[in-house]
Amino acid sequence: MPSIDTLLIAADSTLRTLSGASHSARAYPAVGGAAVPPLDESQRRLSGALMRVNHVGEICAQAMYTAQSVTARDPALRGLFAHAAREESDHLNWTQRRLRELNARTSLLSPLWYAGAFGIGLLAGRAGDAVSLGFVVETERQVEQHLEHHLQRLPNADLASRAVVRQMKDDEARHGASAQAAGATRLPAPVRWAMRLAARVMTTTAHRI
């Protein structure tokens, strides 16, 4: 059973994530925060939609890591999840800030995304630490691909969003590598396919809602 302290930390993380009160321990990657040259309206809308999807991804990451830290058997593994969650909190803050700069909103379904990802994290954690780490490896691999796709789609002029996404991509690769080194097991193909399908539903929906 998780300790009271662990449960309180998880509850605090949930409230901070859903209330938009996340903080960044690292500097904002987009110096100045504004695109140079300025974006036209169609570019601004595209960047806003893509960064909204990225913000939802960070909400899901917070939920998943929080749930996995609650269910982790190994204290060292709990620390690994907590460290990754802190860096994902930076991402959450950066994407939220960039959305404000683009005059774009966050997803209206954020609580739903959080609940779904939290449930997945609980299931992964209950299946054992190696499986839980396997979910991290596969999730981060898919997120890396997703962020690379966004770098191809973002307007060339949107230097700010590009800087944020590049730093996020580097961090996700490191999280996946750390999970692999910690003893992750490879997930069965049907599980990986289901994760990919769920991610596609989320990204398609969050692009608009």
Image (tube, rainbow, N blue to C red):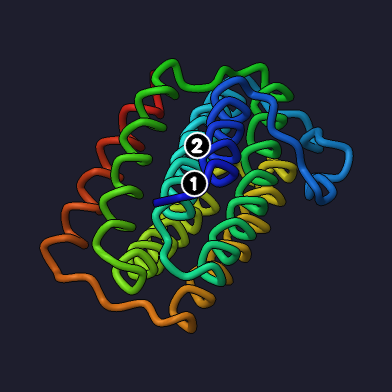
Up the image or down, 205 lies above or below 144; here it is above
What is the three-letter code of the residue carrying label 2?
Answer: Ile
Find the residue positioned furthest to the left.
190
Residue 158 percent across, percent down from the top left: 69, 40
Pointer 1 local density, CA inside 10 Å: few below 14, some 14–19, many at least 20? many
Residue 99 circle label: none
> Given the current orientation, which residue lies at the most extreme right position?
32
Query: Is residue 26 rendered to the left or right of residue 178?
Result: right
Q: Which residue type carries mark 1?
A: Thr
Q: Position of residue 178 (x, y in %)?
A: 53, 76
Q: Are marks 1 and 2 in contact (CB under 8 Å)?
A: no
Q: Is residue 106 above or below residue 87?
A: above
Q: Which mark is residue 59?
A: 2
State the image coordinates of residue 26 (x, y, percent, origin top left): 81, 51
| Residue 66: numbered disc | 1
Q: Nearer the viewer, mark 1 or mark 2?
A: 1
Q: Spatial distance from mark 1 to mark 2, Cα to Cα? A: 11 Å
Q: Residue at x 33, y 74 (%)?
A: 130
At a point 44% along the width and 41% down the height, the residue shown is 60
The picture places residue 66, in percent across and down from the top left corner, at: 49, 46
At a point 53% along the width and 39% down the height, the residue shown is 10
N-term mark: 1 or 2: 2
From the image, which quarter does the C terminus lie in?
A: top left
Which of 1/192 is in front? Answer: 1
Callout 2: few (<14), some (14-19), or many (20+) C-alpha neighbours within 10 Å? many
Quadrant of res 71: bottom left
Q: Nearer the viewer, residue 19 or 41?
A: 19
